Image (cartoon, helix red, strand yellow):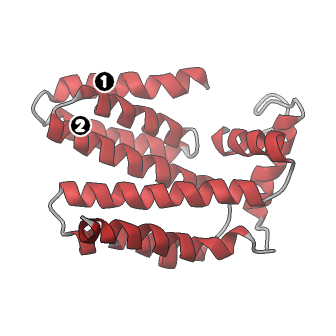
Amino acid sequence: MFLRRLPVLVLVLGMAIALAPFVGQAMVNSDELDELANAWRQLHGQVIYRDYFEFVPPLPQWLAAGLFALGGPGVVWPRVLQALALVLAGLAQYGTARLAGVRPWLAVLPGLVLATALFPQFPVYYHHWLALAFISGAVWCAARGLQAGKLPYSAIAGALLGLAGLCTQTDGVLVAVAMGLTLVGQPRGRDHLVAAVAGCLVPLGLA
């Protein structure tokens, strides 16, 4: 049993070790500073698109504002949240690869490459990284739903894509279109598509 779980353990520990130095780094990128400054505005009553303009959708700012409300302003807690989200993204990518028949030790590679090679190219609290985490979870849920024939997985996949769109519009829309086209061609595809659309509308409607 332990040997079967060893790849997952290596994946989690490897990603955590690779991402940990970023949490405490002194450098603050201008994009990261913009996200956190807008989160501070939100916390103090300003409303995005009404009181100030921002190209990026509001979810990364809302998440940071919530952390500021709990622990005070700073870069550490948003970075910790993002690091956890990326580890979950790696696990979702592992799960998707395993559903596709990839062997366990090869299935750990996407997450490890993300943490050790891709993320260091832009190691800041950033809306694209959060969108990637939601998209990775959505792809796993959609694949799991099709394999098991269970519509709730597709609904969760849609909700995660809605959250991805609230981080980066283009990422969420493009993956949603691709997923919709994929679902239509599967058994009970229309049912899965309806469930995914319904799930997507929940976070978008609340936002």
For disc 2, the marked residue is: 145
Q: Quadrant of the N terminus?
A: bottom left
Which residue appears at 43% of the width and 28% of the height?
200
Residue 46: image location, x then y, percent: 86, 31
Q: Position of residue 28 (x, y in %)?
A: 79, 68
**Pointer 1 residue:** 195
The image shows residue 182, relative to residue 96, as above or below, that is above
Q: CA distance from mark 1 to mark 2?
A: 10 Å
Count neighbours of disc 1 (C-alpha within 10 A) and say few if under 14, some if 14 to 19, many if 20 or more.
Answer: many
146 lies left or right of 113: left
Q: Quadrant of the C terminus?
A: top right
Number of residues whose C-alpha sits closer than 10 Å to that of mark 2, classed few (under 14), some (14–19) or many (20 or more): some
Q: Considering depth in this image, is 96 or 169 the residue closer to the camera?
A: 96
Compared to 8, does 143 lie above or below? above
N-term mark: 1 or 2: 2
Image coordinates of residue 180 in percent, x first then y, are: 28, 36
Residue drawn at 80 percent across, 28 percent down? 50
Q: Nearer the viewer, residue 195 or 101?
A: 101
